[in-house]
Amino acid sequence: MTADTFSSATDELRRPATSPVPRIALVGAHGYGARHLDNLGRLGELNLVQLVAVADPRPPAEGTLPEGVATFASLEELLAAGPAPDVVILATPIQTHAPLALAAIAAGADVYVEKPPMASLAQYDEVLAAARRAGRLVQVGFQSLGSHALPALDRIVASGEIGEVRGVSAVGTWVRTRGYFKRSRWAGKRSLDGTDVVDGVATNALAHAVATGLKIAGAEKADDVLSVETDLYRAHATESDDTSVIRVRTSRGGVLLCALTLCAEEQTAPAVTVHGTLGRADFFYTEDRLTVTTPDRERTETFGRTDLLENLLAARRSPAGAHGLLSPLAGNGAFMTVLEAIRTAEPPRAIGAGHVTWKGGDDDAHPVVRGISQLVRRAAAAQATFAELGVPWARELETEQPEFTVDGFTVNGREVARGNDGRRIAPTSSSRPYLHPVRTLAGTVVTDHLPEDHVWHLGAGVAVQDVDGVNFWGGRTYTRDAGAYVWRNDHGRIVTVAADHDGNVRTETLQWLRPDGTPLLNEQRAWSWAAVGSSAWRLTLDFTLTPNGPDPVTLGSPGSNGRPQGGYGGFFWRLPAVDGPRVWTASAEGEESLHGAVPSAAAPWLAWSGTFRQGEPDGGRATLVFLPRLGPEQPGDPWFVRVAGYPGVGLSLAWEHPAVASHANPLHRTVTVLVADGLLSTSDIEQLITTLGETA
């Protein structure tokens, strides 16, 4: 640009700010700033804006800007050159947003700032206060909030088409290369030269997922957020997180679970999902696409989008002012509360190299965390963090009840099982104590919990779907009136009130609580364990259920409520994925033959063998043998067996008819499980059972 051209451009910048066409200055012309240049060109052709200046230490290439646009090295120089532009757009590094916004506001300009708005909650409060004092508008560049799908989604939820809202989740599986984090000094940094940056998957790359999820969950201001939990990890050699779960509890009692990664196998369209009792609505915000799924149908519609700069210009003309903004700074308090939680959290934990595969080379190389796409979906479905899922690279959870901490069960010096008090389980999954992971002596994991297909399946333990009308199984409830599974607010929980761990025996006193917290059942539970030979061990569960009040308590199941072959409830063991599964007894084999069969003296056990893949890259061969105690006080409960749909084994307390627990006749059951390495034969099993002796 010649001196004469610069002079005339500066004169243009000095035109009075009362010009009918808003005068715009862009700070940051590269990266996302290039998109703003394109948009400003579009709006300029419509005579809606006039780009008067660009500030960037690296000016745009010659011929990029319209004739007459002044260029400066900084916003400070730009503002010193003449009257402030009507609007200043900030497409600059995160750590510069607050000081630049304050300077623009002080000069009398309205501001459009790219996401995230600021690098700390303190900065946010300072800029918000300055804007209010000066009467200036500040729009935050969460472009998804301009989507016309959002009001359409509001109407769908209000209509009851997907039923009552159970929760909101945001899922993003993206790919970012080494080169992505080399594009600038601040990329991948939590701080730079002592200044907060807070780059990361949730605060920058997939920040739209968080902001859109918060909007849909009804959390806009800081007061709308009750708590934020962070679970942060990284596979890249960065300071910031690239694979994380953020769980937000709102003041309205809702939950937003954001499961996000930049380390996927391939990039997919991110989505925010509203989970309802009758269906779900998925908003693919980068595409403005909304899919509504109910039992009757699935429909998809693509919507338009209001440009946020146009929206800011309209708000400047409107008496409503800031109330007309689609992404006002004041409406980003909830997002900034999330960012602050990430900023103040412990640095993200590195994901071990053994769980990461690198693809591509040089700056195009990108890490793929093993199984991350499924883990992200599981986290969203279960409203759980990676740590709560028990992912092998995740951090250890701190117990919420140290007085009831479940020490690991050890056999021959090896930990073979670990207890979970269940208090972190989502209420709709009927939180309860359970064992997971359970391992063979060689280390093969033979339980699963929070699986994607049924997130309320929890390792090995006790669960019943209908206890005097209360669901202690989790998920939907099968009712005779509906003749179907329905979501109801009927979920109870089982809590530990006393526990003792002595040698190879753990005893627990538990209470089964109604949704309102009042006790319904008391339970005495005992786990015991011991070696059985050199490659197997046995785990025995003994439990007794007694009413808390004077009246008997009825224990039912979908089967007792009219669903054929649906009599699950009682002892239940959820298995992980198993290759080549074999399920058999001494007299029959296969799911169809065994499901509903009753253990007997001639066929007292049920075995399951195969290659178990939970936590094992190549799998581990193992056999489980389930052996209930039979006798006058413990009648044979039918086997509940699932192989094709999902892998699980249980003993049904109420196959077709409910069971009853009373003070005169408490419900008492005992079952032993043999956990063995390798694929056992029937004769191997019979020999193991013989060695059990009285311990079975």
Image (spheres, rainbow, N blue to C red):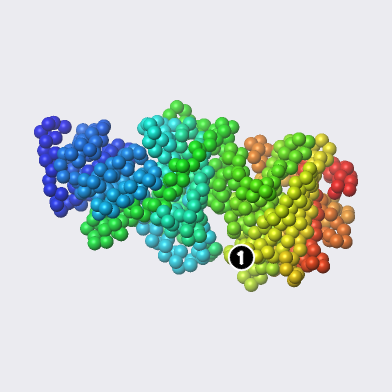
Residue at the far front: name it.
Answer: 403
Residue at the spot 69% in from the left edge and 54% down from the top edge: 496
Label 1 is placed on what type of residue?
Asp
Residue at the spot 80% in from the left edge and 57% down from the top edge: 669
Horizontally, is 396 left or right of 225 in the view?
right
Any part of residue 66 in sight: no
Above or below residue 644? Residue 165 is below
Residue at the spot 39% in from the left edge and 38% down from the top edge: 197
Horizontally, is 428 left or right of 690 in the view?
left
Disc 1: which residue: 516
Above or below residue 414? Residue 308 is below
In terms of secondary structure, where does tag 1 sit?
Answer: loop
Above or below residue 292? Residue 578 is above
Horizontally, is 192 left or right of 231 in the view?
left
> In terms of image quadrants, where is residue 552?
bottom right
Residue 638 image offset from top left, x and y in percent: 78, 59
Any part of residue 154 in sight: yes
